[in-house]
Image (cartoon, rainbow, N blue to C red):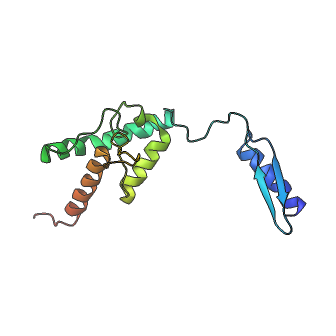
Amino acid sequence: MDQIAAKNLKRKTEFFAPEAKTMSTKTSSSLSVAVRQPAKARRSWCHQRPVAEGRLLGEQMARMAAPHIERMLATFPNERPPCADCAFVKGTEANGWAVTGMNALKCVVEGDQFFCHQGKDGTGDPKHVCSGWLACRLGIEVAKQCEGMTPRK
């Protein structure tokens, strides 16, 4: 890595991560690698705590999920209801976490599974999908079915 590229990399790193101490360059025979030195007690950007943006996202997620949760529980009474601290339930701590909200919403939209944090097996793997996620996915599937129907005249 030439000196100009190393200087630019250092400048970018200082801009995007001002808490990082220094950039050092480790060189072997023909390979140079920039290594970022971690700062002391640096807080991760994805630390799970309620923030204003997370609360706004969580409020909309709960608004979107509530009717589907009610419909799911009415249609399938044996289905597990959302847990007391579900990301899809308004007012819970997880409902105010921005990163969890973004992950949950992405999983709903893309159809990837979003697992419940409560039920884990002996190895720490989740036992079942989140009920709030399941209700939202059912709502999307119902909407897709209705979209294909022709209106009565």
Q: In which quarter of the image is the N terminus?
A: bottom right
Q: In this image, 73 relative to 7: left or right? A: left
Residue at 24% over, 46% down: 68
Q: Where is residue 99 in the image (x, y as percent from the top left)?
A: 49, 43
**Residue with the most extreme front position:** 122
Residue at 83% over, 55% down: 25
- Residue 6 picture quarter: bottom right
Residue at 37% over, 50% down: 114
Q: Position of residue 66 (x, y in %)?
A: 27, 40
Which of 14/144 is in front?
A: 14
Residue at 13% over, 47% down: 75
Which of 48/126 is in front?
A: 126
Q: Position of residue 15 (x, y in %)?
A: 75, 45
**Residue with the most extreme bottom position:** 30
Counting every numbered tag in the picture gives 0
- Residue 145 picture quarter: bottom left
**Residue with the most extreme right position:** 3
Q: Where is residue 120 in the image (x, y as percent from the top left)?
A: 36, 44
Q: In this image, 94 relative to 19: left or right? A: left
Q: In which quarter of the image is the C terminus?
A: bottom left
- Residue 70 picture quarter: top left
Which of 86/145 is in front?
A: 86
Q: In this image, 147 relative to 31: left or right? A: left
Q: In this image, 98 relative to 117: left or right? A: right
